[in-house]
Amino acid sequence: MTAGYDFPWDDRLAVPDPASFPELYEGVLWRRVFAYMIDLVFIGIIAVGVWIVFAILWLLSLGLLGPLLWFLFGLVPLAYHTLLLSGRHSATFGMRCFDLELRSVTGARPSFIQALIQTALFYITVGMTCSLILLVALFNRRQRTLHDFLAGAVMVRTLPSA
């Protein structure tokens, strides 16, 4: 599970009940918003570095690599979130700043495929609905967004040892 904390996963419910374990969900929504803002800064820094490398490659190829490089450049946010969510912390740098982590509904850390699905669904649903789809989190007790439901994941607080 997490570093030093045993999540109270209930086999019947799969995801801990917010009424029984409110500390897992306390402030998750506002923490997610600010964590994403921090992540945008990191993605921007990475994108600048990648853009410099790609600009050099574009010049060296006399523009022939342009379409491929633009496609790869668009994958920077997807790679950032997927690799960090499937990593040992189950959280991006922004999430770590706000004591959040992503978990599978079974309590396990998300696999690479689950993190990829979570991230892809986030960008697809937010892009298609101009972020309005994120309001789903206001209408369920575990504050899960649509991409959380579809990917079989839940965002919880990282807690110290019980």
Image: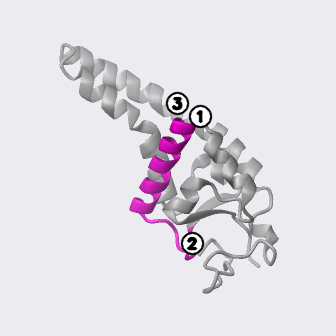
Residue most extreme to the bottom: 11
Foreground label between 3 and 1: 1
Can the viewer see residue 90 in this picture? no
Residue at the image point whose x is 42% and y is 54% from the top: 116
Instruction: Write down the residue under mark 2.
Output: 105
- Near mark 3 (Cα within 10 A), the count class, few <14, some 14-19 or many ≥20, is few
Spatial CA span between label 2 and label 1: 27 Å
What amino acid does circle 2 point to?
Val
Mark 1: give few (<14), some (14-19) or many (20+) Cα within 10 Å: few
* Callout 1: SS: loop
Q: Position of residue 43 (x, y in %)?
A: 52, 35
Where's the C terminus, which quadrant?
A: bottom right
C-alpha distance separating marks 2 and 3: 32 Å
Q: Secondary structure at mark 3?
A: helix
* 77 displayed left or right of 35: left
Residue 39, picture quadrant:
top right
Classify 142 as above or below 39: below
- Where residue 114 appears, x then y in whole percent? 44, 62
Please tell me whether the stretch drawn in magenta is mainly helix, strand or loop.
helix
Span of residues in magenta? 104-130
* Callout 3 amino acid: Ile
Of marks 2 and 1, the one in the foreground: 1
Q: Are marks 3 and 1 in contact (CB under 8 Å)?
A: no
Q: Quadrant of the N terminus?
A: bottom right
Residue 15 picture location, percent across and down: 64, 75
Q: Which mark is residue 130?
A: 1
* Circle 3 residue: 45
Label 3 to label 1, Cα distance in Å?
A: 24 Å
